Image: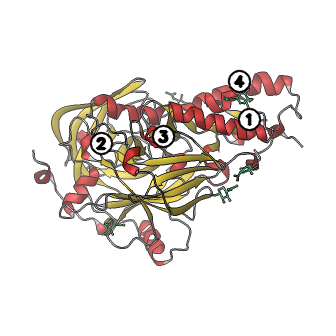
Amino acid sequence: MHCSEALNIHWRASVIQPIWLLALLCIHAFPSLEVATNLMGKPGEGYYIEVEIGSPPQTFNVLVDTGSTNFAIAGALDPNVETYFISLNSSTYTSHQKKVSVLYTQGFWDGELGNDMVYFPSLLAPQVRCDIAVIKTSHNFYMNGSQWQGILGLAYPVIARPDHGVVSWLQAIQHLKNHQSVAFALELCGSQDGGNRQTGLFEILETGIERTELWTSPIVREWFYELLLLGISIGNQTIDLPCRKFNTDKTILDSGTTSLMLPTEVFSMVVKLLNSSLMDLSVPISSDFLVLQKMYCWNDPVDWAHFPNISLSLAHFDNSYIVLELSPQSYIRKVSDDSELPGAQHCYKFFIESSKTGTVLGVVVMEGFRIVFNQSGKTIGFAESICGPAVSLSGPFETETDIKSCMNPTPLPSVSPLTVAAYVIAALTSMYGVLMGYVTCHWLWETYVKHKLPRSSSETSILNSN
Ligand SMILES: *[C@@H]1O[C@H](CO)[C@@H](O)[C@H](O)[C@H]1NC(C)=O
Ligand SMILES: *[C@@H]1O[C@H](CO)[C@@H](O)[C@H](O)[C@H]1NC(C)=O
Ligand SMILES: *[C@@H]1O[C@H](CO)[C@@H](O)[C@H](O)[C@H]1NC(C)=O
Ligand SMILES: *[C@@H]1O[C@H](CO)[C@@H](O)[C@H](O)[C@H]1NC(C)=O
Ligand SMILES: *[C@@H]1O[C@H](CO)[C@@H](O)[C@H](O)[C@H]1NC(C)=O
Ligand SMILES: *[C@@H]1O[C@H](CO)[C@@H](O)[C@H](O)[C@H]1NC(C)=O
């Protein structure tokens, strides 16, 4: 069936819940107010939004993911999800009689491709009919306790599974707007005070009403949201590598990945510089923390002044760039709350990881910015948000470097099933990293802190106890 024929549109403006309407009106009327939120989640487990699928509507939460394109929802009982979509109970569901699956090294999901009415009560967007992957079996996909049961992929059709003929939710919205490209914004706020809940805002934007000035970076290829990373600095030291290394094989902006992931060679340089700047300040910190992403627990909060800022330079125009500056609170995160781990109140994890599939600018980079994904302008726009960790945006700066030389010269990689799958893995490993870290931490606490360090003092100065 051709996609546009399948489109069946119902405006449900009257059904927009008053509270959301109020919230959205507030944002537009009083930009200085706090960011209204429609995204929630637990740190390290992604941001999700509420969705209604089918008729009568069945309500779920789905992970907001700019690193994939399919809309997929749990469609069978699973020990890790509380609820699932029952297609038989929806009078508007139609099946494409086609299988769809995503396979990755640590797991998979597969299911049936169909379509149904999809509506997000918190968005000023109409109900649309789009393709849905109804997940029948899966392994290591859901996260117990995460509260989400599916995924909303917001990237381009090229990477949709099983092929680019799938009508994503964003495309369905575009068809409705006479094939005009749609822009959307993500404003991820993280958790206040290192707590166990994070919030954010996802908005579909009408052309021309963007209220803040944006520094833009071009989308160099339209599949993932691929950008060009021109340089990285740790404090005032610059990573001395040819800029192409940063983008091999690509640099993408992905809300479905927690960490900042860097190509192996770049990652080792970052760790080296970070390590040496910590050494300079005589902060002995185990390499395990930086290299193996192990979680560390201290009795007192980390003194952030010991850690340098990290700056990422992104292409702006042909000979200029903009700089996103992240403070240590962005890349070193508190990963547990007091109740879970009596005694060791302050556990932290390093959220920069090495990657074999290029650079992934994950949640760690996105938090603190308002980010506008503009498909018609082929740009990603950045502004400082009023929420989230302290970050700053500066530029544009002129550069003599030929920006095109920073691009990985391979043609648009053929999108094999494996390429796409890599991103789901990235998302999962970095999320599961937290859980493994928790175990490490618990172990550390049990065997080291508790027995060998009776309460105060230690040789490490960031363990500075009262
Ligand atoms: C999921 O988490 C809950 C509460 O933490 C626990 O009781 C349950 O056994 C877990 N389920 C699985 C499949 O791990
Ligand atoms: C689905 O339909 C069955 C049979 O009509 C009904 O028993 C069940 O409660 C329905 N489930 C939901 C979630 O609506
Ligand atoms: C770089 O930072 C270090 C320590 O923060 C400082 O000692 C040094 O003077 C700085 N170098 C420059 C060129 O700013
Ligand atoms: C950090 O620096 C110390 C001292 O120079 C060195 O022994 C250690 O191996 C370094 N760790 C890493 C991960 O580079
Ligand atoms: C997207 O980019 C186009 C072209 O630069 C511009 O006209 C449009 O206003 C932008 N949309 C938003 C929401 O920023
Ligand atoms: C680090 O970054 C934060 C936020 O971007 C900024 O406020 C702060 O001044 C920076 N610190 C240094 C030492 O540059």
The percent position of residue 98, horizontal first and vertical second, equals: 17, 33
The percent position of residue 76, horizontal first and vertical second, equals: 33, 32
Location of residue 434 (image quadrant): top right
Give the mark nearest the N terminus, 3 or 1: 3
What amino acid is at disc 3?
Pro
What amino acid is at disc 1?
Cys
**Are circles 2 and 1 on residues that touch, CB within 8 Å?**
no
Location of residue 375 (image quadrant): bottom left
For residue 314, side relative to residue 77 (left or right): right
**Quadrant of the image for the N terminus?**
top left
Using the image, tell me which numbered label, if any, was put on residue 384. Answer: none
What amino acid is at disc 2?
Asn
Residue 161's place in the image compared with 366, above or below, is above
Residue, disc 4: 443
* Frontmost residue, 85 versus 282: 282
Q: Label 1: how many residues lie within 10 Å, few (<14), some (14-19) or many (20+)? A: many
For residue 53, side relative to residue 326 (left or right): left
Residue, disc 2: 70
